[in-house]
Image (cartoon, grey):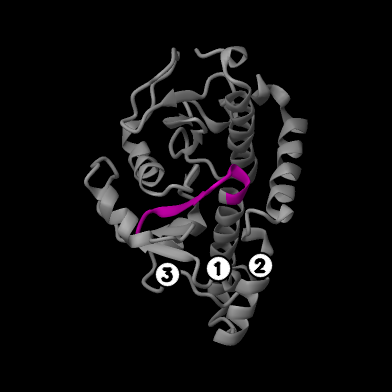
Amino acid sequence: MEKISNASSIERDLRIQLAGCYRIFDMLGWTELIYNHISVRIPGAESSFLINPFGLHYSEVTASNLVKIDLQGRILAPSDYPVNPAGFMLHAALHNGIAEAHCVMHIHTTAGSAVASSQVGLSHDNFYAAQLVGRVGYHDFEGVTVHAEEGPRLLRSIGDAQAVILRSHGLLSWGPTIPNAFIYLWSLQRACEIQLAGAALGQAVSISPEIQTKARADALQFDPTHPSGKFVFDALLRQAARIDPGFRD
């Protein structure tokens, strides 16, 4: 296991923030047994990333047991745990192909996977979905993500979209920071939850393209230079620390 005290100060801070993010996902119910990933690039070592140890639940992830790997999923520092190479394919493609994709997140929530499996995809007729107009990319399902050759097709599918719906699969986001990637994923997940719940009530009230465009422009939380996205993440991080501060170890 890589001791956190041996890491650089930048890596140490990232480890604590990333481990806290795993605990936030657990707190929000975004877990899928031991599967799915949140990965973050280590500055100054552009081919090195931190990811969860395979076999642990998100509630068990700590700063010191996060695993440092390269783009091929090879472990770069001593670790008591392996990584899941199948799941990392998506992350490796984005980390390698998008300069600003310092953090990549992927979930299989019920609401997200349900919308991803519907023919219509995300409807932009609710509060959060309207803010995501023009920000969502789609990638068609190609089976279990174990083949690296899918990576270039994934990149072409999503373009510069930071909120991604993986058809018949789940949700994905990326960003220059952990909080920025998180606010995209939270907003996409929330939009899917509302769409799924509202479907039982019949057709949603339409939001005009003009209002959708206005909502997108006013959604300042997606701007990585605006503090609101970080404020949201930091508030949840404090909540996770109150539940169990052990993720910092």
Total labels drawn: 3
N-terminal-most mark, 2 or 3: 3
Q: Are marks 1 and 2 in contact (CB under 8 Å)?
A: yes
Determine whether, in the image, residue 25 is placed left or right of residue 147. Answer: right
Q: Nearer the viewer, mark 3 or mark 1?
A: 1
Residue 208 seen in this snapshot: no
Helix, strand or loop at mark 1 = loop
For mark 2, what is the residue? Answer: 219
Looking at the rendered image, the quarter that the C terminus falls into is top right
Residue type highlighted by circle 1: Leu
Q: Give me the disc on residue 227.
A: none
Q: Nearer the viewer, residue 13 or 105?
A: 13
For mark 3, what is the residue? Answer: 121
Determine whether, in the image, residue 37 is placed left or right of residue 89. Answer: right
Tell me where the magenta segment starts and ends, as one range: 167-180
> As displayed, is residue 65 above or below residue 21?
above
- Mark 3, other Cα within 10 Å: few <14 / some 14–19 / many ≥20: some
For mark 1, what is the residue? Answer: 132
Residue 118 seen in this snapshot: yes
